[in-house]
Amino acid sequence: MRRVKLHNPFKTRIIDEKLLREHLALERTKLANERTLLSYIRASIYLLISGLALLQIKEYQGISLMWVGYLSLFICILFLLVGISRYIALERRLNDLLRDDNSEESESSK
């Protein structure tokens, strides 16, 4: 088993390569989770803007687009709620994984 030396400007320490890989994998998953939340927010903002634009159009060739605008605003709120709920759910699962790993490490060191 190789040991990897990490350089930290404040503290240098040696960590197992397996633990380092697991730690970096969890960090990548956290960052992907944040990117996904930002994508949901971006899509929600696009729907908000399009809904407001459609509500500003009074009549377009005899067709009222008000209901499409309201539908877009409803889907905007739905996207935002789904994105936030998925972010929170995955964040809790990741925190549970980290707690389980920390409790196993403390038990094995005893």
Image (tube, rainbow, N blue to C red):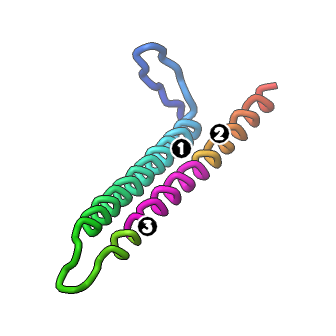
For the residue carrying disc 3, how many other residues have a C-alpha within 10 Å: few (<14), some (14-19), or many (20+)?
some
- Relative to 79, say whether 20 is above or below: above
**Residue 55 position by quadrant:** bottom left
Q: Residue 16, how many percent across, how many down?
A: 57, 33
Which residue does the image show at 53% across and 23% down from the upper left?
14
Residue type (three-letter) at the residue carrying disc 3: Ile
Q: Residue 100, how many percent across, how many down?
A: 72, 40
Regarding mark 3 in the picture, which secondary structure is present there?
helix
**Residue 23 position by quadrant:** top right
Which residue does the image show at 53% across and 36% down from the upper left?
20
User: Marks 1 and 3: which is nearer the front?
Assistant: 3
For the N terminus, the quadrant is: top right
Which residue does the image show at 28% across and 59% down from the upper left?
49
Q: Residue 87, how many percent across, how many down?
A: 53, 51
Q: Could you say which is closer to the camera, residue 47 or residue 93? A: 47
Residue type (three-letter) at the residue carrying disc 1: Leu
For the residue carrying disc 1, how many other residues have a C-alpha within 10 Å: few (<14), some (14-19), or many (20+)?
some
Q: Which residue is mark 1?
A: 26
Q: Which residue is mark 2?
A: 98
Real-space CA distance between mark 1 and mark 2, rounded to the nearest whole angstrom:
9 Å
Q: Which circle's residue, 1 or 3, is located before the other in the chain?
A: 1
